[in-house]
Amino acid sequence: MSPSLLGQHLFFLSQIWSSSSDTYRVSISMSNRVITDTLAQSAKSRKHKKPEGTRSDGLDVGIISREAVGVVTAVGAGLTGVKVGDVVAYAGNPMGSYIEEQILPASVAVPVPPSMDPVVVASVMLKGLTAQFLLRRCFKVQSGHTILVHAAAGGVGSLLCQWANSLGATVVGTVSTEAKAVQAKEDGCHHVIIYTQEDFVVAVNKITSGKGVEVVYDSVGRDTFQGSLACLKTRGYMVIFGQSSGMPDPIPLSALAPKSLFLTRPSLFQYTETRDELLEAAGELFANVASGVLRARVNHKYPLSQAAQAHADLENRKTTGSVVLIPDDVKQ
Ligand SMILES: NC(=O)c1ccc[n+]([C@@H]2O[C@H](COP(=O)([O-])OP(=O)(O)OC[C@H]3O[C@@H](n4cnc5c(N)ncnc54)[C@H](OP(=O)(O)O)[C@@H]3O)[C@@H](O)[C@H]2O)c1
C-alpha cells in the first residue's frame, strides 16, 4: 500500500516488508501518525516507581520507556513535513520505545538533522530537553548565578552542568564517588562535592561564603530535599524534578517563608505542550550538541535484548552519562 493511502483506516494492517533477508515487519497505519524503524533509544531507571504497564501482580503488560530515534518507514495520510527515510526523534509519549518499530503521533516527532549521530540524539533527547527547560525556562540561569546540581554525573546532571557552565554560571555539583567527581569536573562543575563523604549543606555554605545558591536542581529527592532548601539564598528557587532516592517527605508551606523561597516540581511535558515549544527546545538542544557546548556521554551501549542488564546497572548506580539500547538488528 502506498503511503498516500495510509491513514484511511485506523489500525488497518497496511504493509508487510522485508527489513532484512530473514525478517518481516508488519506496520499499522493511522492518520496523523508516522511509523519509525528504531535506531536507538535511551534507558532510564524506573526503580523508584512501578513501571507503567505493570499489573498489580507484577506481570508486564506493556513496553516501557519513552525516548527513541528512528527512520520513518510510513507516513499517515495528508501529513506534510515528514517523509519516508527521514530520521526523527521523540521524548515523552507514547510509552513503549523498547521496541524495533513504533507508531508515533506526528506532533511528537522531531526532525533530526542529517549531520547528527542517531545514538547521540537518542542519548540526549529527553535528558537534553529536560536540561533546556530547567535552565532556560523554569529558572533562567544567567551569568553570575551560582547553582547547585545534584547527581551531577547522571544523564541529566551531566548536561545541566555543561550547559550552565556555558551560560556563565558557577556550577556546584554533587556526586557519590571519586570517579563521578572526575566526570563532573570535566563537564564544567567548578566545585564538586562527594555527598556520600561530606555534608553538602556545609560544603555549599563554605563555597558561597554563607550566601547560598540562586537555584537547586534536585533530581535525587528524599535524600537531598531538606538539605537543598538549606542551600538556597533568599528568594532562591527549589527545582525538584525527580526522585531517584524516593519521594521527599512533605513540608509545610511555612517552611518556605523564612527565605521567601520558590518551590516547583516541573515536568518536561508541560514545557513542551505545543509543537512550537517542542521544536524550539529541540533546535536549541541540537545546536548546542553540534557546536560542542554539550558533549553527549554515551558511556554505555547495550543491545536491546540486554535491556534487563542495562536496568540492573542503572539501579545499582554503576552507570554515568547516558545508557543507550540499540535493536539487535541495527548495524552501527
Ligand atoms: N521532571 C522531568 O521532566 C524529568 C525529565 C527527565 C528526567 N527526570 C528525572 O531526573 C532524574 C535523573 O534522571 P537521569 O536520566 O539523569 O538518571 P540517571 O542517569 O540514572 O542519574 C540518576 C543519579 O541519581 C543519583 N542517585 C542518588 N540516589 C540514588 C538512588 N537511591 N538510586 C539511584 N540513583 C541515585 C545517582 O548519582 P550519584 O551516584 O552520583 O548519587 C544516579 O547516577 C530521574 O529521577 C528522572 O526521573 C525528570
Image (cartoon, grey):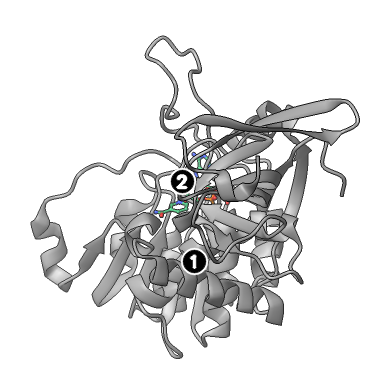
> Residue sitting at 91 percent across and 31 percent down?
21
Does mark 1's beta carbon lie closer than 8 Å to ligand 1? no
First in sequence: mark 1 or mark 2?
2
Q: Quadrant of residue 263?
A: bottom left
Nearer-the-camera pick, 104 or 171: 104
Q: What is the three-letter code of the residue carrying label 2?
A: Ser
Nearer-the-camera pick, 168 or 127: 127
Within 10 Å of disc 2 (Cα), the crowding (few <14, some 14-19, many 20+) is some
Classify mark 1: helix, strand or loop.
Answer: helix
Which residue is under mark 1? 131
Instruction: Give coordinates of residue 308: x percent, y percent.
Output: 66, 26
> Residue sitting at 54 percent across and 28 percent down?
63
Q: Are marks 1 and 2 in contact (CB under 8 Å)?
A: no
Q: How many marks?
A: 2
Residue farthest to the right, as pictured: 21
Q: Is residue 154 visible?
A: no
Q: Is residue 14 visible?
A: yes
Image check: 253 left or right of 28?
A: left
Q: Which mark is residue 44?
A: none
Within 10 Å of disc 1 (Cα), the crowding (few <14, some 14-19, many 20+) is many
> Residue sitting at 25 percent across and 41 percent down?
249
Which residue is under mark 2? 31
Q: What is the three-letter code of the residue carrying label 1?
A: Ala
Q: Quadrant of residue 208?
A: bottom left
Measured in 3D between alpha carbons, the distance from the residue under mark 1 to the one under mark 2, in whole angstroms, is 32 Å
Does mark 2's beta carbon lie closer than 8 Å to ligand 1? no
Instruction: Give coordinates of residue 108: x percent, y percent.
Output: 47, 55
Instruction: Give coordinates of residue 76: x percent, y percent.
Output: 53, 49
